[in-house]
């Protein structure tokens, strides 16, 4: 997975997690645009465990792609009804009330 960390005011961590095979691409529907070629998503390759550790420390997580969204489902930080599809690519955001 490709992970990009963004630290915002107050030191809160916003994390972008994206499947490696779709990074750099653009997707759209009539209602949504998803630009995975932007610097917002261009991060570093991380192992699943490294990604889990970062997700657990994050205030907000933005997840794109089958593997990334499935990981969030496995961690029980989202539910299936939270997921939207943009050009058949799963996308979801999760916010932690604890971080």
Image (tube, rainbow, N blue to C red):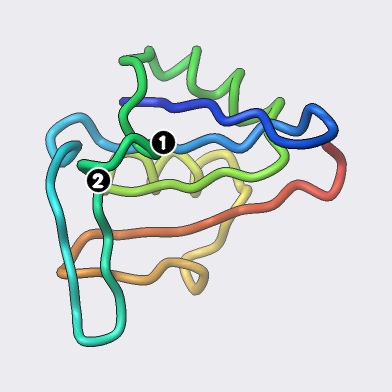
The correct choice, above or below, for 49 with respect to 11 in the image is above
| CA neighbours of label 2 inside 10 A, class few (<14), some (14 to 19), many (20+) | some
Q: How many labels sit on residues?
A: 2
The residue that mark 1 highlights is 17
Q: Residue at x 38, y 45 (%)?
A: 70
Q: Which of the image's four quarters has the N terminus?
A: top left
Q: Give me the disc on residue 36.
A: 2
Position of residue 83 measured from the top left corner of the image (x, y, whole percent): 43, 66
Mark 1 residue element = strand
Residue 58, position as x, y percentages in the image = 68, 33
Depth order, front residue of 28/81: 28
Q: Which mark is residue 44?
A: none
Q: Tell me if 54 is positioned left or right of 51 in this view.
A: right
Q: Earlier in the sequence, mark 1 or mark 2?
A: 1
From the top left corner, tell me how far across and down residue 39 is, in percent.
33, 35
Q: Residue furthest bottom?
A: 30
Residue 32 lies in what quarter of the image?
bottom left
Helix, strand or loop for disc 2: loop
CA separation in Å, label 1 and label 2: 11 Å
User: Image point 15% across, 38% down: which residue?
Assistant: 24
Q: Residues within 10 Å of mark 1 (few under 14, many from 20)?
A: many
């Amino acid at each position: 997975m490709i992970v990009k960390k963004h630290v915002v005011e107050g030191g809160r961590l916003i994390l972008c997690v994206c499947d490696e095979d779709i990074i750099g691409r653009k997707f759209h529907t009539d209602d949504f645009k998803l630009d995975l070629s932007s610097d917002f998503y261009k991060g570093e390759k991380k192992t699943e465990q490294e990604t889990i550790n970062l997700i657990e420390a994050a205030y907000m997580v933005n997840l794109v792609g089958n593997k990334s969204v499935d990981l969030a489902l496995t961690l029980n930080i989202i539910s299936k009804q939270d997921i939207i599809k943009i050009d058949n690519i799963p996308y979801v955001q999760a916010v932690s009330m604890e971080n």
